[in-house]
Amino acid sequence: MHSLRSFITAGAFALGFALAAPATADSLVPVPQPTPMPSFKIPGINGSSGSDANLRNKVTIIRFWASW
């Protein structure tokens, strides 16, 4: 039983390796160019305001939530 399992595993590995052909220029899909984020202003908790200008060239995570 152990040798059969090893044989099946080796066969599956060989098949996967054979089917994993390298990508060619014809099979690649062009990546669309990113569009700039729209400008925005948002009020802060303490009365200050923030805008997208403060976030330029910085990694930013914007988290949206809703309560309904």
Image: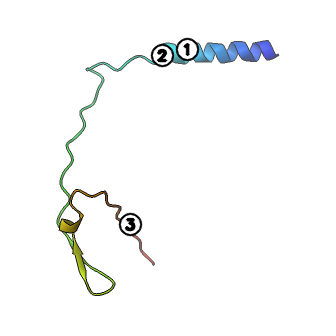
Callout 2: SS: helix
Q: Nearer the viewer, mark 3 or mark 1?
A: 3
Task: Check if mark 2's residue and mark 1's residue have beta carbons within 8 Å.
Answer: yes
SS for tag 1? helix
Q: Report helix, strand or loop for mark 3.
A: loop
Residue at image mark 1: 15
Residue 26 badge? none
Vertical arrangement, residue 18 with respect to residue 33, above or below: above
- Please say if 18 is above or below 30: above
Residue at x 21% of width, y 68% of height: 54
Mark 2, residues whose alpha carbon is within 10 Å: few (<14), some, or many (≥20)? few
Whichever of callouts 3 and 1 sits on the residue coming sooner in the sequence is 1
**How far from the left and from the top, in percent, is residue 66?**
41, 74
> Which residue is located at x 63 percent, y 13 percent?
11
Viewer-closest of 11 and 36: 36
Amino acid at dot 1: Leu
> Pointer 2 and pointer 3: residues touching (CB < 8 Å)?
no
Tell me the residue that label 3 is attached to.
63
Q: Give the residue at x 32% y 60%.
A: 60
Q: CA distance from mark 2 to mark 3?
A: 41 Å
Q: What is the residue that sits farthest to the bottom in this orientation?
A: 47
Question: The residue under label 2 is which amino acid type?
Answer: Leu
State which quarter of the image contains the N terminus. top right
Residue 53 on image: x %, y %: 18, 66
Counting from the top left corner in percent of width and height, residue 47 is at: 27, 87
Colouring rule applied to residues? rainbow
Q: In the image, 2: left or right of 64?
A: right
Return the mark for residue 19: 2
Instruction: Tell me the residue at 24%/33% (across/down).
Output: 30
- Return the disc, 2 or 3, that comes first in the chain's sequence: 2
